[in-house]
Amino acid sequence: MLIRFILVLVLAVTALPAFSMQEAENFTLKDYNGEEHQLTNYTDNKAIVVMFIATRCPVSNDYNDRMVELYNDYADKSVAFLGINSNKSEPVKEIKEHAEKHGFQFPVLKDHENVIADRFGATRTPEVYVLDPELNVVYHGRIDDSQRESQVETQDLRTALDQVLAGKPVSNPKTKAFGCTIKKVD
């Protein structure tokens, strides 16, 4: 009976969806100006924040100021930020106008075929991944716990970055991202 229970438990656990990935693979994408960016170009930083974002998603747009603030607070602490737009219906020109309008100082890259979103397992905007210099995923999930900035109680991304910068393991490495679904290529 115990063996049957253990077998059922093992089968149940292996049927659960796995964490999308433990280590990111290098990729090359172009930003809205046509400049290529390789993920490995940012490994001289203490952390790399990969943010899947959108121009038309109201949830992602509610985070625009917070993303700018995060960049401003951490860029000089050796944290790189990359925005990635994987929505098929949002053209490069629109991405450029959106980034300029909202003051994004970090590169915003276009993932035309959803290859990078699929590789990361990203399904929402905004959805973030924090990578260490070896491209290990040390945090995956939301920026914070509320679309409404006035109701934020947990600043998950800030906490993760502060722990990484302090040389500590991230205490809560996975949270549930919320927002609009990434509109994929058919």
Image: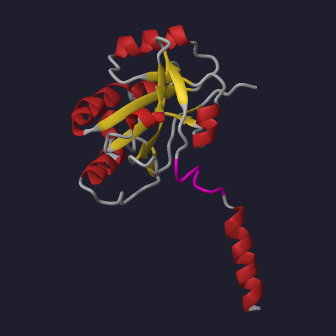
Residue 169 in picture, x, y percent from top left: 34, 60
Which x, y percent locates residue 49?
A: 40, 38
Q: Is residue 169 visible?
A: yes
Question: Could you say which is closer to the camera, residue 155 or residue 129?
Answer: 129
- Magenta stretch encompasses residue 155: no
Magenta part of the protein: which range?
17-23
Is 121 left or right of 43, judged from the image as shown? right
Give the overall secondary structure of the magenta segment: loop
In the rendered structure, the answer to whether residue 6 lies left or right of residue 142 reads right
Q: Where's the C terminus, which quadrant? A: top right
Q: Residue at x 45, y 37 (%)?
A: 40
Q: Residue 174: x percent and y percent?
A: 47, 54
The one nearer the camera, 144 or 14, is: 14
Between 98 and 81, the one lying in front of the other is 81
Q: Quadrant of the N terminus?
A: bottom right
Position above or below: 166 against 181: below
Residue 154 visible to the viewer: no
Name the spot of residue 117 as percent of width and height, x first: 59, 35
Tell me how many marks there are: 0
| Residue depicted at 39% across the width and 29% down the height | 63
Q: Residue at x 50, y 28 (%)?
A: 84
- Give the image's coloring scheme: secondary structure
